[in-house]
Image: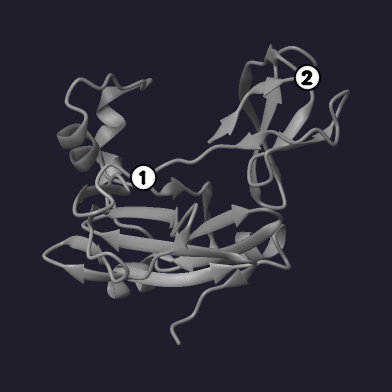
Amino acid sequence: MHDRRIDGKTYTFGNASTLFMSAMTWYDHQTNSIWSQPWGRAIRGPLKGIQLFLLPSQVTTWDNWRTAHPNTLVMTNDINLMPNLRHKFRPDFVIGVIYESQARAYPYELATAETLIQDTLGDTPILIWAANNDFRAYIRRLPDQILTFQLKDDMLIDEQTNTTWDPIRGLAISGPLTGQVLATLPTITAFADHWTDFYPNGEIYSAP
């Protein structure tokens, strides 16, 4: 998910119906520039080289989202296509974390098998949580300390203060740090081979 504002101007995008390196491309209505979806960057046209800002987003199911946000409206061209969203992820499906020029992809099946992954991306301590068809990526650092977590009854407990955290929201819900929120990391979804094509220097996480 990207911020579609450039220099204070909001742009409108559509599907260019062409592939670049076997991945989707967009075009913007204002300049007809062509954009790479995995990069979020214009690859042809007047805006070539412009990079859209990658926003934090969630990988989840419609059922989980609707439970958390019951008043959500859905944009769809054909309601009959909605059942397709129940299909399982492919084994080579990865979720890439991109932050401060560092990139690492986490295989979805591996992440769900481990549930909790505590990693470091560059100099940034991060937390990957995946369960019940939900995936979250957070910075596990507060202004004054780095946190280490354990799982307990589907919640996260930090070892430093014994605070309980909601993994869905990254929110401390009881204990000394109640009310604190972990910063959410921006992610992209891809297949492993596409990730390697677009981020050749980005690692793919493997279990220690």
Mark pair 1, 2: CA separation: 40 Å
Say if 41 sits above or below 148 in the image: above
Q: Amino acid at mark 2?
A: Asn
Asked if marks 1 and 2 touch (Cβ < 8 Å), the reply is no
Q: Position of residue 173 (x, y in %)?
A: 20, 47
Q: Residue, x 29% and y 56% (percent of image)? A: 88
Residue in view at x 66 percent, y 51 percent:
22
Q: Residues within 10 Å of mark 1 (few under 14, many from 20)?
A: some
Q: Quadrant of the C terminus?
A: bottom left
Q: Secondary structure at mark 1?
A: loop
Q: Position of residue 24 (x, y in %)?
A: 62, 41
Label disc, if present, on residue 181 of the rendered structure: 1
Residue 191: image x %, image y %? 53, 60
Is residue 100 found left or right of 44 in the rendered image?
Answer: left
Q: Is residue 175 left or right of residue 58?
A: left
Residue 32: numbered disc: 2
Image coords of residue 169 (percent x, y): 29, 44
153 vs 206, left or right, is: left
Above/below status of 38 relative to 51:
below
The three-letter code of the residue at mark 1 reads Val
Label 1 vs 2, first from the N-terminus? 2
**Mark 1 or mark 2: which is in front?**
1
